[in-house]
Amino acid sequence: MTKYIFVTGGVTSSLGKGIISASLAKLLQARGYRVTIQKFDPYINIDPGTLNPYEHGECFVTEDGAETDLDLGHYERFLNVPTSQANNVTTGRIYQNVIRKEREGAYLGKTVQVVPHITDEIKSNIRILGESGDFDIVITELGGTVGDIESLPFIEAVRQFRWEIGYNNSLVIHLTLVPYLAAAGELKTKPTQHSVKMLLEYGIQPDILVCRTEHHINQDIRRKIAQFCNVNINAVVESIDASTIYDVPLLMLKEQLDKTVLTKLKLPHKNEPDLESWKDFLGRLKNPTAEVNIGLIGKYVELQDAYKSITESFIHAGARNECKVRVHSLHSEGITEENVNEKLAGLDGVLVAPGFGSRGIEGKIVAIKHVREKNIPFFGICLGMQCAVIEFGRNVLKLDGAHSTEMNEDTHHAVISMMEEQKKIKNKGGTMRLGSYTCELKKGSKAAAIYGKTRITERHRHRYEFNNDYLKQYEEAGMLASGINPENNLVEIVELKNHPFFVAGQFHPELKSTVANPHPLFVNFVAASLANKRKK
């Protein structure tokens, strides 16, 4: 029977439930278990696809085209296993499903209520992955903090679910905060006690407490927490601040979290976790032989999580190149013709990030012109590719006012235009070109050399595309369409022939980069930036 682990959070948000879930899953996977993780988000949006990145960080897109929470990115980066629509469920989706069933008459005229109808729908979503037969253990992370009004139906569903399947087949890990009061010079356990007390009021006794802390927790504090929270002392786990999230699996291994979990679930310990490749990655990450400075030009740089997958991809690629990648975030609104030299000074490579809308577009175009003319390595993603096409059209092909119809519907040269199948769509949520699509690479192109093959798949999230009416002009002037979707001839990759590294993709390669398999575009871009630095 599939075993279930539920991860809740208390005291405060942003303690790292996603990282703890991914780290535990990594340890169990390394012991030979088939593990997956799902995230339940308590907000009423159907998915984060329509959320501003300032609200919720990046929107992570799965292979099957689901727009999901950024924590699914952590799950994939740690486990090197794709997630799907079933791995992310929101309150909005739960209520949408229940209301649809009510309209269809599925409840036979019953009064539809939070209990049992909403909680039953939550439980059915918990079961989906477990009943697939693909996994031995399903870890479910509950978003938000215990005590939040919107989280209550999820907590109640977990209580019911555990009673239904038996307490030997599930456990609850509660992530909490043990703050350090500098004035008193000591760690305080009272917030943890109150958080557990609140969980108990909802009918759930946590089995394991993971205590986030800035200072080591000694045995006396562990004993105190265990005594007042009704758990075994070996179930009080320290989660001390780490220099990188990739340290956390090894920290949890040291705390024997995986052993405690397997014992409580009555599962065999199997082999000791095989983490040699993980340790090799960490060794490369922490002992670089070189350093490179890369500019990340975007519209949401004030929020670190807005480009989370990109920054993590640079970590993976840097480790593969044994190189420290220093990412310098630059707001595109602040870049002009007058200051571009100053803004981009000292950078060995430039990545122009994805986004939507007209704000900051001209700054991106100015930056791309600069790196194209100065032979600085350039990497464009989604809107970054579209800006590269616009810049080339304006400044090389001399197409006056060349633009995207997203920003200027009346442009005389719509080098980027809305995809035909998107023109009749009115709803915003879940209607873009989403998920994995095939791309064929031209033999002899830089893209084909980078991937080492001519047929690839990448994940998309966009409504606008390269206008093929201009393709001949672009290729004659030196911008090669080196990646094409075979079904609709969508230009997926463009590159410049006479440039050290000028590659841009309509897709999002950052969504497929993992610790085990760094994305080749990022690996080669970092290598090109390093070569540029050495040349200088």
Image (cartoon, rainbow, N blue to C red):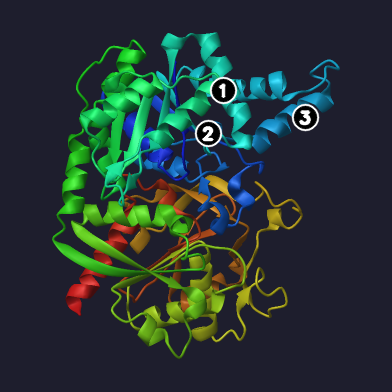
- The residue lying at 44 percent from left, 79 percent from top is 367
- Which residue occupies the foreground of this view, 99 or 214? 214
Sequence-wise, the earlier of marks 2 and 1 is 2
Of the residues shown, which amino acid type is indicated by label 3? Arg
Residue 6 in the image: state x and y as whole percent. 46, 25
Q: From mark 1 to mark 3, how far is it between C-alphas?
A: 29 Å
Q: From mark 2 to mark 3, how far is it between C-alphas?
A: 29 Å
Q: Nearer the viewer, mark 1 or mark 3?
A: 1
- The residue lying at 63 percent from left, 58 percent from top is 463
Residue 6 to residue 381: above or below: above
Q: Secondary structure at mark 1?
A: loop
Q: From mark 2 to mark 1, how far is it between C-alphas?
A: 10 Å
Circle 3 packing at 10 Å, graded few (<14), some (14-19), many (20+), is few
Residue 294 in the image: state x and y as whole percent. 32, 69
Q: Is residue 124 among what the camera can see?
A: yes
> Marks 3 and 1: in contact by CB < 8 Å?
no
Q: Is residue 79 among what the camera can see?
A: no
Residue 7 to residue 279: above or below: above
Most extreme residue toward the right is 109
Pointer 2: what residue? Answer: 146
Q: Secondary structure at mark 2?
A: loop
Pointer 3: what residue? Answer: 100
Answer with left or right where residue 487 lies relative to residue 218: right
Of the residues shown, which amino acid type is indicated by label 2? Val
Sequence-wise, the earlier of marks 1 and 3 is 3
> Marks 3 and 2: in contact by CB < 8 Å?
no
Pointer 1: what residue? Answer: 202
Answer with left or right where residue 155 lies relative to residue 421: left
